[in-house]
């Protein structure tokens, strides 16, 4: 299967939710925006819908990655 556009498959609530489940299962760390995973999860539906809306409108601007040394 060839993919000519990788952005289109991102625009799925189900894919975003599955990605969230993987982050939660791995106990991922919060980002540089200061929002913890439990805080994000409290408004999960709203946060994922907003993310999907921003991705669809191409207005999403990711923040820098927070480096964690192990």
Image (cartoon, rainbow, N blue to C red):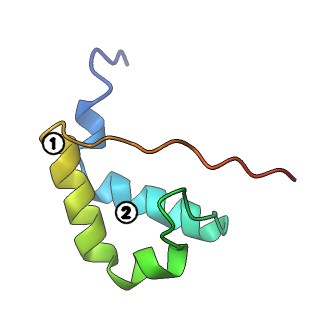
Instruction: Pick the residue in front: 3 or 70.
Output: 70
Decide which of 31, 12 is in the foreground and name it: 31
Percent of width and height locating residue 35: 48, 70
- State how far apart marks 1 and 2 are (Cα): 16 Å
**How far from the left and from the top, in percent, is residue 39?**
45, 80
The circle drawn on residue 17 is: 2
Determine whether the residue tagged by mark 1 lies in a helix, strand or loop: helix
- Secondary structure found at label 2: helix
Judge from the rendering whether residue 54 lies leftward or rightward of residue 35; answer left or right: left
Residue toward you, 59 or 16: 59
For the residue carrying disc 1, how many other residues have a C-alpha within 10 Å: few (<14), some (14-19), or many (20+)? some
At x 28% / y 37%, what residue is drawn? Answer: 9
Which mark is first along the chain, 2 or 1? Answer: 2
Nearer to us: label 1 or label 2: 1
Residue 56, label in figure: 1
Q: Identify whether 5 is placed above or below 61.
A: above
Q: Residue furthest right?
A: 70
Give the residue displayed 29% in from the left and 68% down from the top: 47
In the image, taking residue 49 as reference, residue 16 lies left or right, namely right
Residue at 44% across, 45% down? 63
Q: Position of residue 2 (x, y in %)?
A: 35, 15
70 and 4: which is toward the camera: 70
Give residue 44's quadrant in the image: bottom left
Disc 2 crowd, CA 10 A, few/some/many (<14, 14-19, 20+) = some
**Residue shown at the point (35%, 52%) measured from the top left:** 15
Horizontal and vertical percent for residue 68?
A: 75, 52
């Amino acid at each position: 299967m060839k993919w000519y556009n990788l952005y289109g498959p991102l625009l799925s609530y189900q894919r975003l939710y599955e990605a969230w489940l993987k982050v939660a299962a791995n106990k991922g760390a919060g980002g540089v925006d200061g929002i913890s995973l439990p805080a994000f999860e409290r408004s999960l539906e709203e946060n994922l819908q907003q993310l999907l809306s921003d991705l669809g409108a191409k207005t999403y601007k990711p923040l820098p990655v927070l480096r964690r040394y192990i």
